[in-house]
Image (cartoon, rainbow, N blue to C red):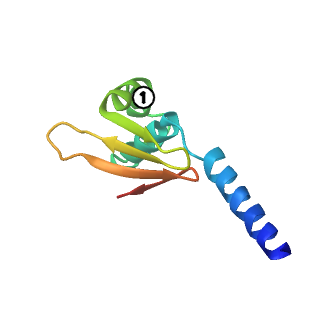
Amino acid sequence: MKRVAIIWLVVGFLLVALYGLNPPKAAFDRFILAHVKEQQHIRKGEFADQLYSFLGPALIDQLSGRNDCYFFSLYTLDLPGQPSRRFLGILHIFLPV
């Protein structure tokens, strides 16, 4: 009986942790923006960094969507002229799927 209670406690803790660490849309937008800056070799403080930081979030918000599944989220990024890219957001980590 004790073993069953411990298992339920662990499962409950994991579900609460997954729910609490489900990344919001703003976290995904920051993740994509940081990835774009890295790919473009933009250094912090450069004019391009300031431009991306100013315009990027609004643009990414328009090009991405979120499907909230409570314990994780599925994100879609629709860039013009490219196929949609999907990401799994879980525990504040974003994984391409």
93 sits to left or right of 32: right
The residue closer to the viewer here, 96 or 68, is 68
14 sits to left or right of 87: right
Position of the C terminus, as image quadrant, is bottom left
Whether residue 93 is situated above or below residue 1 in the rendered picture: above
Q: Residue at x 33, y 50 (%)?
A: 86
Q: Residue at x 74, y 69 (%)?
A: 7
Hey, which quadrant is residue 12 in on the image?
Answer: bottom right
Q: Residue at x 30, y 32 (%)?
A: 63
Whether residue 9 is situated above or below residue 2 in the rendered picture: above
Q: Which percent across, then down, holds residue 2?
A: 85, 73
The residue closer to the viewer here, 71 or 84, is 71
Q: Which percent across, then down, holds residue 52?
A: 39, 31
Q: Residue at x 44, y 28 (%)?
A: 50
Q: Which percent across, then down, holds residue 72?
A: 51, 49
Whether residue 55 is situated above or below residue 21 in the rendered picture: above
94 sits to left or right of 56: right
Q: Which percent across, then down, holds residue 47?
A: 40, 29
Hey, which quadrant is residue 53 in on the image?
Answer: top left
Which class describes the residues within 10 Å of circle 1: few (<14), some (14-19), or many (20+)?
some
Name the residue carrying label 1: 57
Amino acid at circle 1: Pro
Residue lying farthest left?
81
Whether residue 48 is situated above or below residue 85 in the rendered picture: above
The secondary element bearing badge 1 is classed as: helix
